[in-house]
């Protein structure tokens, strides 16, 4: 099966490269090869490469910057996705597309199911939700949407790496303690995606995948410090103080609660998500 992966340098793209089964020869498409803000380029590369499976892990992911440039976010997260879905429908290809917990408004108190009502709070979430709608409209039979959340890895920049840097630089930290979610190690998510591709498990629909358990950002920061100290990645401990979302204003609003229910995808792939703390330890050991 010929596989084309949109994304090359992102966290999930690099994790897909790290975990690729030996017999798979995917083509990774970077920004220089195809600028996703230009729909014509997306269609052209697809017609040239003619993949049987598209995996889209590229996206406009700058949550706060999207408030300033919503059109750019919309082109990459909606229009490019529409082109991929149109191709999948026309050519009978499979399309695995990554989406986000930010399609929800965070008012629920129990884990979000894939079929729950959506309602994004900012431009990024809105553009990702529009991408989901576009894909499901153009190719409902060929699209598998996987929503994830709080992604980190040894690649790129992310919360874990930022916290480690700040814990080295500062004497004290304040971290938001009223937003709850599930951290997700990109490597574990990549393995789940390969499980789908490698075992012919593709099944159209909307799915969720994060690591197991849920915490606040402040609890996550404390865990990062504890595990990094034990792993010898930090040499000193600093106080980490809980603060509120109001204390740390950002251009884009974020859901207060965005825990996702993973059961549908866990059942499909026959793998239970790994507890977040176990994956955090694994990531620190690989950093
Ligand atoms: N990170 C999270 O916490 C999180 C949470 C929920 C869902 N997700 C979703 O998971 C997926 C993967 O996330 P990630 O963390 O791996 O993202 P990431 O590290 O930010 O990588 C995004 C990738 O998209 C590429 N890209 C952005 N604009 C582009 C354009 N105009 N043309 C071509 N390529 C472009 C980037 O290329 P450059 O390197 O050239 O910029 C980068 O390789 C995304 O769909 C994201 O929405 C992520």
Image (cartoon, helix red, strand yellow):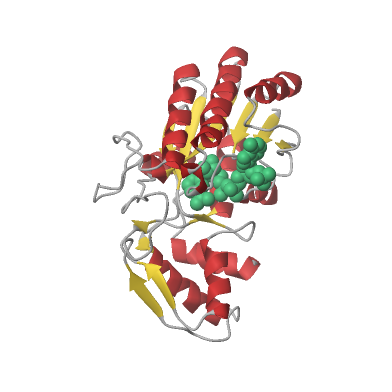
In the image, taking residue 49 as reference, residue 68 lies left or right, namely left
Give the residue at x 59% y 35%.
Answer: 56
Between 263 and 35, the one lying in front of the other is 35
Rendered residue at 35%/46% (across/down): 261
Is residue 120 in view? Answer: yes
Q: Is residue 152 left or right of residue 47?
A: left
Query: Could you tell me if residue 192 is visible in this image?
Result: no
Give residue 113's position: percent from left, percent from top. Answer: 32, 40
Instruction: Pick out the residue farthest to the front.
Output: 68
Q: Position of residue 273 (x, y in %)?
A: 45, 52
The x and y percentages for residue 236 are 54, 86
* Whether residue 92 is situated above or below residue 277 in the rendered picture: above
Name, please, the residue furthest toward the bottom: 236
Residue that lies at the very extreme toward the top in this rendered image: 90
Relative image position of residue 187 (x, y in whole percent): 59, 53
Quadrant position of residue 46: top right
Q: Is residue 216 left or right of residue 74?
A: left
Residue at figure coordinates x 70%, y 38% from the top left: 31
Residue at the (37%, 50%) spot, across then down: 253
Counting the numbered discs, the total is: 0
Q: Is residue 143 above or below residue 7?
A: above
| Res 169 quadrant in image | bottom right
* Quadrant housing residue 8: top right
Give the answer, above or below, for where 224 lies relative to 63. below
- 46 over 154 or under it: above or below: above
Q: Quadrant of ligand 1?
A: top right
**Which quadrant would the N terminus be assigned to in this image?**
top right
Q: Quadrant of the C terminus?
A: bottom right
Give the camera-side residue of 112 and 262.
112
């Amino acid at each position: 099966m010929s596989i084309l992966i949109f994304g090359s340098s992102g966290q999930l793209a690099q994790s897909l490269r790290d975990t690729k089964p030996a017999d798979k020869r995917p083509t990774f498409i970077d920004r220089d090869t195809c600028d996703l803000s230009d729909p014509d380029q997306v269609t052209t590369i697809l017609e040239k490469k003619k993949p049987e499976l598209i995996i889209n892990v590229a996206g406009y992911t700058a949550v706060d910057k999207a408030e300033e440039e919503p059109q750019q976010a919309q082109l990459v997260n909606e229009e490019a996705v529409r082109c991929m879905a149109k191709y999948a429908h026309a050519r009978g290809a499979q399309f695995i597309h990554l989406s986000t917990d930010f399609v929800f408004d965070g008012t629920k108190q129990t884990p979000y199911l894939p079929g729950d009502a959506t309602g994004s709070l900012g431009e990024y979430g809105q553009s990702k939700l529009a991408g989901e709608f576009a894909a499901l409209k153009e190719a409902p039979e060929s699209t598998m949407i996987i929503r994830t959340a709080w992604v980190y890895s040894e690649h790129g920049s992310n919360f874990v790496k930022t916290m480690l840097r700040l814990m080295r630089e500062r004497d004290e930290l304040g971290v938001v303690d009223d937003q709850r979610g599930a951290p997700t190690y990109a490597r574990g998510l990549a393995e789940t995606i390969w499980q789908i591709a490698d075992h012919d498990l593709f099944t159209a629909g909307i799915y969720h995948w994060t690591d197991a358990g849920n915490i606040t950002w402040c609890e996550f920061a404390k865990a990062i410090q504890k595990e990094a100290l034990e792993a010898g990645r930090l040499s000193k401990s600093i106080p980490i103080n809980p603060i509120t979302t109001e204390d740390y204003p950002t251009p884009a609003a974020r859901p207060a609660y965005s825990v996702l229910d993973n059961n549908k995808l866990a059942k499909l792939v026959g793998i239970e998500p790994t507890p977040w703390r176990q994956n955090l330890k694994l990531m620190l050991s690989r950093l």
